[in-house]
């Protein structure tokens, strides 16, 4: 398999792919999103619900906020194509019907509900962005992360309907009064993980039907 091997957990009606554990820990810049998308397509999947950790680019997008983005900007980390035919000549985007279903289903079970819409800015990582970079990103985006843009392109090229729920684990550098620290990021990430585990137990069976 290109870029493999890729490990999937087969749960019958759905499969689980832990993108950062394939099989060892891999930071965002070293993920092979095309290998992941290829593995999902081979397994018979037709749609993807992605989860992402991100930083808030606005003061109101505080840690604990969830968002279902409807667009992506990835100018500094241009997602690549693995094709040389018409599959590469497309405008990638979140599948509208699948994104709407994900948002509606998520918000029947999550409290507080996820925000419907928003722009996800993708950077290279794994470092955090500087305050000047954050100011530039905030002119066009609401949250910043390191994976969703590339994953969206890889899935779209394999006709996998793609939607994402991202959780704000921290305010990006320069948005909060104090500089962002790794400890602050880890605290937010762990709090989001507990929330996601609880919501996913109820959301996944509905979305897999």
Image: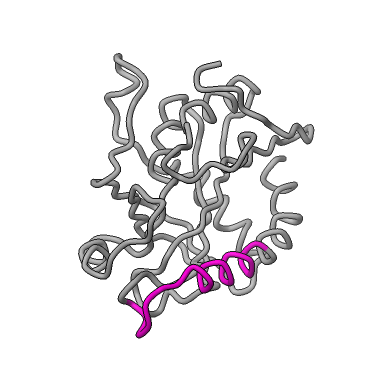
Determine whether 126 is above or below 153 in the image. below
- At horizontal 50% and vertical 36% (from top left) the residue drawn is 161
Residue 186 position within the rendered picture, expressed as x and y whole percent measured from the top left: 56, 67
Residue reaching furthest to the bottom? 177
Q: The N terminus lies in which quarter of the figure?
A: top right
**Most extreme residue toward the right, as rendered?**
12
* Residue 10 position in % (x across, y down): 75, 32
Region of the chain picked out in magenta, as a range? 175-193
**Quarter of the rendering containing residue 89:** top left
The location of residue 83, given as percent across then percent down, is: 35, 18
| Residue 191 painted magenta | yes
Q: Is residue 182 above or below residue 155?
A: below
Q: Image point 58% across, 29% down: which residue? A: 46
Residue 88 falls within the magenta-colored stretch? no
The quarter of the rendered structure image containing the C terminus is top right
Please determine whether, in this image, residue 40 is positioned above or below residue 123: above
Left or right: 106, with 154 as reference point: right
Quadrant of residue 6 within the rendered picture: top right
Q: Which residue corresponds to the image point at 48% horizontal and 57% vertical from the top-left? A: 68
| Magenta stretch prevailing secondary structure | helix
| 79 lies above or below 166 | above
Residue 8 in which image quadrant: top right
Q: Nearer the viewer, residue 207 or 140?
A: 140
Q: How is the image coloured?
A: one colour
Q: How many marks?
A: 0
Choose between 190 and 127: the one closer to the eye. 127
Say which residue appears at 69% left-offset and 54% top-offset.
203
């Amino acid at each position: 398999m290109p870029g493999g091997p890729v490990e999937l957990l087969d749960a019958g009606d759905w499969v689980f792919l832990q993108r950062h554990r394939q099989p060892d820990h891999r930071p965002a810049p070293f993920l092979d999103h095309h290998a992941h998308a290829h593995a999902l397509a081979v397994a018979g999947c037709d749609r993807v619900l992605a989860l992402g950790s991100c930083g808030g680019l606005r003061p109101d997008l505080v840690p604990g906020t969830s968002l279902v983005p409807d667009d992506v900007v990835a100018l500094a980390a241009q997602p690549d194509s693995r094709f040389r035919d018409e599959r590469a000549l497309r405008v990638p985007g979140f599948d509208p019907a699948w994104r709407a279903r994900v948002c509606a289903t998520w918000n029947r079970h999550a409290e507080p509900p996820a925000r419907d819409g928003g722009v996800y800015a993708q950077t290279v990582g794994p470092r955090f962005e500087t305050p000047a970079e954050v100011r530039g990103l905030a002119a066009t985006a609401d949250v910043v992360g390191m994976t969703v843009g590339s994953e969206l392109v890889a899935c779209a090229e394999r006709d996998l309907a793609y939607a994402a729920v991202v959780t704000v684990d921290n305010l990006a550098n320069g948005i909060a009064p104090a500089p962002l620290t790794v400890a602050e990021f880890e605290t937010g990430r762990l709090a989001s993980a507990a929330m996601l585990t609880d919501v996913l137990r109820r959301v996944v069976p509905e979305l897999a039907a």
